[in-house]
Each structure stands twice: as C-alpha cells, then as structure tokens.
Image (cartoon, helix red, strand yellow):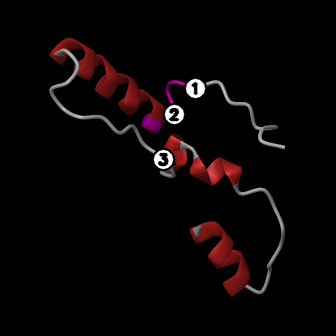
Amino acid sequence: MDAAIADVAAGKPVGRNYTSYGLMKEGGSDIVFVKGVAPAEAEAAMEAKRAEIKAGTFEVAKMMDEPK
C-alpha cells in the first residue's frame, strides 16, 4: 500500500503490479500461529525458516500469474 501511495504522491499514479510488496521478504505478510499449539521443535523450525525468508536466504516458490 505504501508503494501505491508513494506513486500517487510523486505524481505517478499507475496501474502497476504491486503484488511483490505483499511478500514476507518485503514485509507485506508474515506467519501467524498460536504459540504452544505445535510442539516447541516445530515452532523453532518455523521461526528459523521465517528468519531465512525475511533475510532473503530462502526463496519461497511463487505463482505470480495467479489470480487472474
């Protein structure tokens, strides 16, 4: 949303694809879970993978052509 607002504020309102800004790596989404529901080992593994995604060292497969 910030990117779209910045484009408009800069006088460049365009209909470009802002999908990439919704990715976890870009700070647009995150993992939501209830602590204590899964085993501690699973939570630790998830937190480690989350950190890799945010750091850009783990690439999650994307289908950027969907939805149509």
Classify the position of the N terminus by image quarter: bottom right
Main secondary structure of the magenta stretch: loop
**Which of the 4 image quadrants contains residue 61?**
top right
Amino acid under label 1?
Glu
Residue 44: x and y, percent? Answer: 23, 20
Q: Verify whether residue 67 appears in magenta.
A: no
For the residue labelled by badge 1, is the local secondary structure a helix, a strand or a loop?
loop
Residue at 82% in and 62% down: 16
CA gap between label 3 and label 1 equals: 15 Å
**Horizontal side, residue 51 vs residue 42: left or right:** right
**Horizontal side, residue 49 vs residue 39: left or right:** right
In this rendering, the count of numbered labels is 3
Q: Which residue is disc 2 drawn over? A: 56
Residue at 48% in and 47% down: 29
Q: Which residue is disc 3 drawn over? A: 29
Which mark lies nearer to you, 1 or 2?
Answer: 1
Amino acid under label 3?
Ser
Residue range corresponding to the magenta coloring: 54-59
Which numbered disc, 3 or 1, marks the residue that appears first in the sequence? Answer: 3
Which numbered disc, 3 or 2, marks the residue that appears first in the sequence? Answer: 3
CA gap between label 3 and label 2 equals: 14 Å
Amino acid under label 2?
Gly
Classify the position of the C terminus by image quarter: top right
Residue 22: x and y, percent? Answer: 58, 50
Label placed on residue 41: none
Q: Are marks 1 and 2 in contact (CB under 8 Å)?
A: yes
Which mark lies nearer to you, 3 or 2?
Answer: 3
Q: Which residue is disc 1 drawn over? A: 59
Residue at 18% in and 32% down: 35
For the residue labelled by badge 2, is the local secondary structure a helix, a strand or a loop?
loop
Q: Residues within 10 Å of mark 1 (few under 14, many from 20)?
A: few
CA gap between label 1 and label 2 equals: 7 Å
